[in-house]
Amino acid sequence: MTATPLSRRAVLGGVGAAGLTVGVAGGALGRQTLTDGPDDPAPAGALGRAAVPFFGTRQAGIVEPGQARVQLAAFDLAPGAGRDGLRQLLRRWSATAARLARGETAESAENQVALDAGPCGLTFTFGFGASLFDKAGLTDRRPAALTPLPAFPEDAIDPARSEGDLWVQIGADDALVVFHAFRVLQRQAAGTASLRWQMAGFSRTPGATERPMTPRNLMGQIDGTGNPKPADAGFGEKVFAGGTDWMRGGTYAVVRRIRMLLDNWENLPTDRQERVIGRRKSDGGPLSGGGEHTPVDLTATGPDGGLLIPADAHVRVAAPAANGGATMLRRGFSYSDGVTADGSPDAGLLFVAYQADPLRGFVPVQRKLARGDGLSRFLRHESSGLYAVPPGAPEGGYVGQQLLEG
């Protein structure tokens, strides 16, 4: 007998994206089996039973804590698919996402890869690139905030791994669950949309530490301490779009694949690394004093009168106070794809940032980082995308319904 999975949103509701997921007690096996055996299958563990509803006012995978695994991908609409083809695809994808998020099997293109797993906190987030609107006959409904991102100094953007008509973020706490969900969507898109690019990322597995902790990135730094939280004043206005059109309650996602120059970084002594970031590597506390969650004091000075947090430290240059209050909700994942042609690690950060308006969020912050951030010399931005992420789908409806039928 299959019981209703425990809602991960209900258990973790209100927790910001900077936090880590933890094991969820209670619940029941969510994923249905396709074969009958003499014995009941062993139930998924508490982590496997965690489920996030697909339908809702806002899409999942934005304010929920980041999972252990992610698949990012972009698709291009096939010639001639048009608005009708797009509508049919989004209906199909939304129905499938709802089923898989409940721990059920897909109605079509099911490959049984994740047959014996629970939903594992599976989330789907869909976005629309600027190029989609012309192809679907929706030019007049393209948001002004979807203006292409400008070029930034030192960018090394590969167009083949950037942009795209349709963007998908699939996250879960199990790699097979993520792969299965992505592969099902890819097969269901055949004839309507083709894969443009895909990237796989990871973060710390829930339960890997004795207590929930902010994850570290591949530079060894605690990453995500300063992320805004839903309980913060003004959070909704800074992260979610307002207005009266189809994007009300949606958001905008900036996606960047950022390679870390790890050979150069790891040759720096720890104290130099800390001055580049502005935080201690051991516990994430700011160099101005205190623990990880102590507010950064950008005015603090040492006995010699010098700034404790250097003028080009990442936390100083990126601080909202130094950028007119610009705020983004970051949801980053690490990646590792072997080595580059020169033998250095092809590894770094899959940066995803949600905001109400990228022209007031990501763009001014990245301009300032490119000019004065000491961390920039250890990074290479190699792919980029900007997507309008519509509000969530109503029960039984589909993502983008407000756009296509409004």
Image (tube, helix red, strand yellow):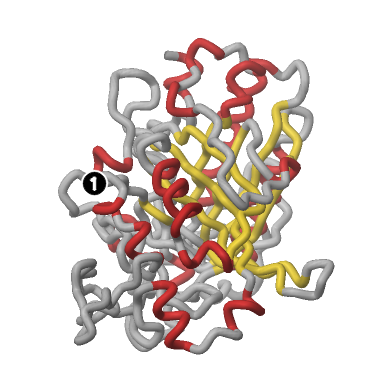
Image height of 69 relative to 161, above or below = below
| Residue 345 percent coordinates (x, y) | 71, 73
Q: Quadrant of residue 77?
A: top right
What residue occupies the far right of the structure in this picture? 341
What residue occupies the far front of the structure in this picture? 304
Amino acid residing under circle 1: Phe
| Residue 166 percent coordinates (x, y) | 61, 34
Q: Quadrant of residue 358?
A: top left
Residue 219 relative to residue 294: left or right: right
Within-10-Å neighbours for mark 1: few <14, some 14–19, many 20+: some
Residue 78 relative to residue 235: left or right: right
Q: Tag 1, which secondary structure?
A: helix
Q: Quadrant of residue 402?
A: top left
Q: Is residue 395 visible to the viewer in this orientation of the structure?
A: no
Give the residue at x 58% y 19%: 133
Give the residue at x 18% y 53%: 232
**Residue topped by disc 1:** 235
| Residue 148 percent coordinates (x, y) | 55, 31
Give the residue at x 20% y 81%: 290
Total marks in image = 1
**The C terminus: image quadrant:** top left
Give the residue at x 35% y 52%: 63
Given residues 164 and 108, the one toward you in this image is 164
Image height of 7 relative to 283, above or below = above
| Residue 250 percent coordinates (x, y) | 38, 34
Q: Is residue 234 visible to the viewer in this orientation of the structure?
A: yes
Image height of 136 relative to 56, above or below = above
